[in-house]
Amino acid sequence: MPHLINTMSLHSRLVQSIMALCAIILLTVSTSIIYIVDEQGNKNIASETRAWANILASNSSVFLESENDNSQSKLKSELEKLISTTLINRIHVYRSNEDGSIEFFSSYNKNHKFPAISDKIDQISQLSTIHYEENHLELIVKIIEEQRTIGYLFIQSSLLKKQNFISKLIYVMFGFLIFVLILSFSISQWLFNKTNQPIAKLIEDVGQISQNKNYQTQLATQPYKELDILAKNINILLLRTDKHITTIIDEHQYALSQNQALENRLSARTDALKESNQELLSTLEKLHEFQGQLVETEKMASLGDLVAGIAHEVNTPIGLGVTASSLLADKLSEIKTAFEDKTLKSSQLKKFLTDSDENVSIIFRNLERAAKLISSFKKVAVDQSSAESRTFNVKGLLDEVLLTLSAKIKSANVTISVICPDDLDINSKPGPINQILINLILNSIYHAFEGLDHGTIAINVMNLSDQLHINYSDDGIGIDNSMKAKIFDPFTTTKRGSGGSGLGMHLVYNLVTQALDGHIVLEDDIEHGVSFDITFPVELAST
């Protein structure tokens, strides 16, 4: 969306610019004049004050040296006679004694209504130069007689007259500013009206051309040079626009004819492409069916490995049980014969009971081990063939898988370390988890530990934020860098031609991502072996 631009009319721009310029100039001039008048007024008052101070100090010296008791009142009368200006507000005369002290001698006050002020004896050094206050200025000068300081004269002059004059000057300037603004507004209105007429006519003509789309029309000559240049450029633009539109129409007609020919060719090619796509779809469906069959075959192959391992494991305890039961039957036959012949001895019976107890114990332990193996295999086989959710203990599931694969693990001399909480009960799909762990362990045995005397597998399980994290790692020969990028792709194997289908890790990937709705990552920054991080959502079983 384009940015909105705030526009202003030429009339407003012209009026505001002229009035602002006049106001700035007049304010600058007025401020300068007021400042100059104020500074000059201060200088004149300061000069006149200093002159009066020197005159009055000279006339006061006689009274300061007089021993007459009426000299103070006489000095006051003399000051009233001498001061003929309204500039001076107050006069203080101080006498300097021989001991260096200074005392008040006499004073003058322009108006008896003026309140008296305290003496300025403590400020003699500060007021030796003119000091400005809000409405007056103050000054103290020495009274010297025969190059000897006999006293001091304090004089206070009014600034009100100057301030009143400046106030009047401000009012005059303000009135003049209003007059100038009104005059500038009138002038700007007149200038705008003179300039706007040809502009309005030009806008009207351009609007008519745009509305009628008659780009061959030419604008008339304008009275102002700038507008005339604009009109000539608009005329050039109109001619080029008309030429461009004609070219576009011709190209559009040509494009229509080309599009029709292209549509005919495209229709023929589309028909051919539909036939090819149909063949490809049929081939793809067959490929998916074949891949599904291979995946099921891979599942059955892993189940076949479990059957072979369980058969080997079950064979040993059953064989021991058969041997113990045969031995027990032989012993029982001997005892029965001795009993029938009445040659049975107590020592012989005691030995038979001891041997029988040992054989029964052997039979029970081995049958119990075989039953446990068969039960674990049954649970793993049922879970592996089912994708339904149920509540189960994760540590128990791991133990059942390891017990089922114990024959493969022992024959490959592999040590498996499991870190999993004993009380971790979840609601999930044990079948896919069984299949994932079996495929990973068998993959390590067949590929990672090939040619090695011993191998180690670590399985670390934890639950974080309703996510079950399984880290599976081994210290085998690892995966070549060229194979890491496509380790989960179907038909990727390092045993091609040696019985490897290349679907083991692809099956693991599908089980994690589709059956468990999780994800699996191969860590590629480890030095030896492989490490898989598997994460999928679970629900903790309610206790």
Image (spheres, rainbow, N blue to C red):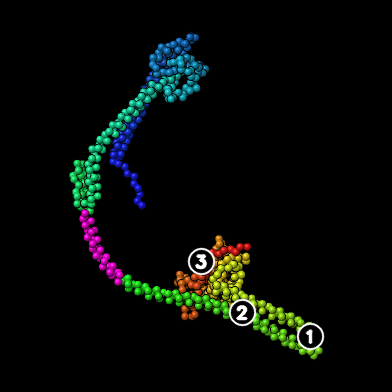
Q: Magenta stretch mostly in which secondary structure?
A: helix
What residue is drawn where x is 32% and y is 31%?
26
Q: Which residue is mark 2?
A: 313
Q: Which residue is mark 1?
A: 348
Q: Nearer the viewer, mark 3 or mark 1?
A: 3
Q: Which residues are magenta?
A: 242-268
Is there a contact, CB below 8 Å, between mark 3 and mark 1? no
The amino acid on which the numbered mark 2 sits, given as a three-letter code, is Glu
What residue is drawn where x is 47% and y is 11%?
73
What residue is drawn where x is 76% and y is 81%?
354
The amino acid on which the numbered mark 1 sits, given as a three-letter code, is Gln
Counting other residues with Cα less than 10 Å from the Cα at mark 2, is it few (<14), some (14-19), or many (20 or more)? many
The amino acid on which the numbered mark 3 sits, given as a three-letter code, is Asp
Q: Which residue is mark 3?
A: 517
Q: Is residue 186 visible?
A: yes
Between 84 and 248, the residue placed more toward the observer is 248
The residue at the far bottom in this view is 341
- Lower position in the chain sequence, tag 3 or tag 1: 1
Q: Relative to 133, does residue 378 appear above or below in the rendering?
A: below
Report how far apart the C-alphas of labels 3 and 1 lie in the structure: 68 Å
Between 141 and 49, the residue placed more toward the observer is 49
Q: Relative to 84, does residue 351 appear above or below in the rendering?
A: below
Report how far apart the C-alphas of labels 1 and 2 lie in the structure: 36 Å
Give percent across and percent down for residue 79.
42, 13
Magenta-drawn stretch contains 474: no
Give percent across and percent down for residue 231.
21, 46
Along the horizontal axis of the image, is 425 left or right of 10?
A: right
Give percent across and percent down for residue 90.
44, 18
Along the horizontal axis of the image, is 88 left or right of 405?
A: left
The residue at the far front in this view is 212
Helix, strand, or loop for circle 1? helix
